[in-house]
Amino acid sequence: MGGFGSGQRCCWPWEPIRRAARESLKHWLATGLVLGLISLPGAWAFWLEPASLRNEDHQLELPSWPSACDGLRIAVLADLHVGSPFNGLDKLAEIVELTQAAEPDLVLLAGDYVIHGVVGGQFTAPEPAAAELARIAAPLGVYAVLGNHDWWFDAERVASALRNVGIALLEDESTRISRGDCEFWLAGVSDFWEGAHDIPRALQGVPPSAPTILFTHNPDLFPDVPPRVSLTIAGHTHGGQVYLPGIGRPIVPSKYGERFAIGQIVEEGRHLFVSSGLGTSILPVRFLVPPEVSVLELGSPAQAPAVLVSHTPGTNLEVHRRRE
């Protein structure tokens, strides 16, 4: 008979418990890993990325752009949605400072200054937001258009808030801008959903051959922009707020889907740039579409590049070129 001195292990009843403990530990480690993999993207999408902020430089070559205006820097602030999560007045002050640090020649405010029903958001009146935006200074001026959310709130009140602090509003109208030998026209077009978006009226008085930048809130009017416009600038889409590699952007508020979602788009020789914006709408989420102050640097190439059929998706910028 075996006993304590027989050489057999005395603690054999504990082996099943040890094995069960090891299996349990593996289970909880696996569960923790899965939860971590789920929670990390969740934390990134609902907290880290929406709370981030950066200047993003974009160099655009425009075949019809005058060499005298080469290097013109335009800061585009789209979809501020002041009051959305991580986008209160304090954040707006940071945006203003970041914009100034970019040393733009011209600043364009592309609409949607207020919010409606964003989860976790708090409504902020347009007056204090406009007062903060009034701190922006640029040699060639600061100009604005209204977005659909501004119309849904009170278009006249938002317009008055901007005008009262000295920000010029261009709603279906244009202005001539010059500095030294550099001269071009800036046309603002009202919102595609809620405004008249009267492109002919906006371009009325602009010489047909003059270099022209057109800016608006919603890029869906781009197919109606005439070829004589050197560059169209818009916001509204937020870049879809979410980009899933291999899948795309599940939701883009455009009748064209992802066609005008983000970045530089070239179709039939006409150029469009869509900023991914700064705030959020509906849900306070951004994934691989970080908020940015888009800083465009315009140039005139020695010769226009060939326009090819291509679609190159990216996490933050897409370039579409369609054959002329």
Image (cartoon, rainbow, N blue to C red):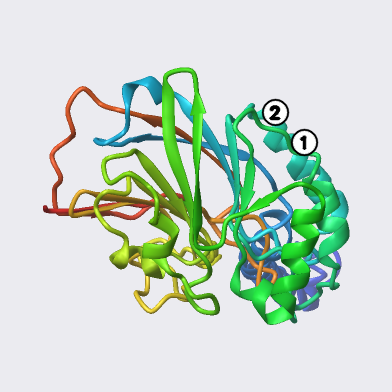
Instruction: Give the amino acid at mark 1.
Output: Glu
Question: How far apart in space, not on screen, are marks 1 and 2 (Cα)?
Answer: 6 Å
Question: Is 51 in front, or is 270?
Answer: 270
Q: Position of residue 210 (x, y in %)?
A: 32, 39
Q: Is residue 240 left or right of residue 146?
A: left
Q: Position of residue 122 (x, y in %)?
A: 85, 72
Discs 1, 2 touching: Cβ within 8 Å? yes
Q: Is residue 45 left or right of residue 254?
A: right
Q: Which class describes the residues within 10 Å of circle 1: few (<14), some (14-19), or many (20+)?
A: few
**Residue 19 in view, yes or no:** no
> What numbered label is drawn on residue 97?
1
**Residue 304 in view, yes or no:** yes
SS label for mark 2: helix
Answer above or below: position of 74 versus 288.
Answer: above
Q: Position of residue 13 (x, y in %)?
A: 79, 78
Instruction: Give the amino acid at mark 2.
Output: Ala
- The residue that mark 2 highlights is 101
Rendered residue at 24%/52% (across/down) = 227
In which quadrant is the N terminus drawn?
A: bottom right
